Image: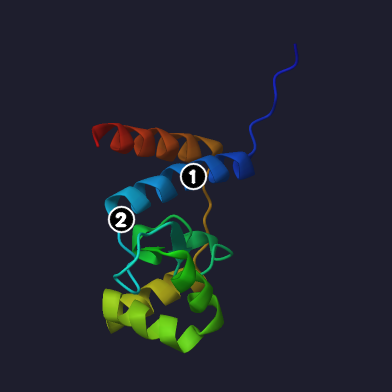
Amino acid sequence: MKKRKIKKSDLQRKLWALLSKRIRQERPVCEMCGKRPSTQVHHIFSRRFKATMFEESNLMAICGGCHIKAHTDYEWARNIFIAKLGQLEYESLYLRANTQLLNWSIQDYLEAIKAEKKRASKD
């Protein structure tokens, strides 16, 4: 039987599923409105910026309504992000998102997935 090749994209999806679940469990109330349960995790700087894709400071647990608003009212969302992170951390995160690359190997992803599973099992 032929072994299936491990793809980075499959490992990224697996890691994202684990990380997203943990973030929502740790932050059960929407971090934007503070009223509704968090059902989704939003990237402050898009997933297309791979360098900050898995950084917890780039993630917010939010409700569906706020997620839609964050993607349609950028200024509103940006102001909340800055209030949460502080101006300096927001700017630092912006620089990392726009200037760094995510050069993880297959092994890096496997180790991150293992660590995320370990963190989840402690809860």
Q: Amino acid type of disc 1?
A: Ala
Q: Is residue 22 left or right of residue 103?
A: left
Q: Name the residue rendered at 53%, 73% in the picture.
A: 68
Q: What kind of element bears circle 1?
A: helix
Q: Front-most of 111 and 39?
A: 39
Q: Where does the image place residue 118, in percent across and percent down from the top left?
A: 32, 32
Residue 36 point in image, percent of width and height: 35, 65
Q: In terms of depth relative to the viewer, which is nearer, 51 or 37? A: 37
Q: Which residue is drawn at 38% across and 59% down?
A: 38
Q: Residue at x 41, y 40 (%)?
A: 112
Distance of label 2 from label 1 (alpha carbons) = 16 Å
Residue 30 visible in this rendered orientation of the protein: yes
Q: Which amino acid type is marked by label 2?
A: Pro
Which residue is situated farthest in the top direction here?
Answer: 1
What mark, if any, has residue 28 been given in the picture? 2
In the picture, measured across the screen, residue 54 lies left or right of residue 13, that is left
Secondary structure state at the residue bearing disc 2: loop
Query: Where is residue 47, by image quadrant?
Result: bottom right
Q: Which residue is drawn at 35% across and 52% down?
A: 23
Q: In this view, does 3 lie above or below 59?
A: above
- Residue 36 appears left or right of 107: left
What x and y, as percent, mark residue 70? 48, 76
Which numbered disc covers residue 17? 1
Position above or below: 48 against 119: below
User: Looking at the image, which residue sits at the far right?
Assistant: 2
Badge 1 crowding class, 10 Å Cα cut-off, few under 14, some 14 to 19, many 20 or more, is few
Quadrant assignment for the N terminus:
top right
Residues packed near mark 2 inside 10 Å, few (<14), some (14 to 19) or many (20 plus): some
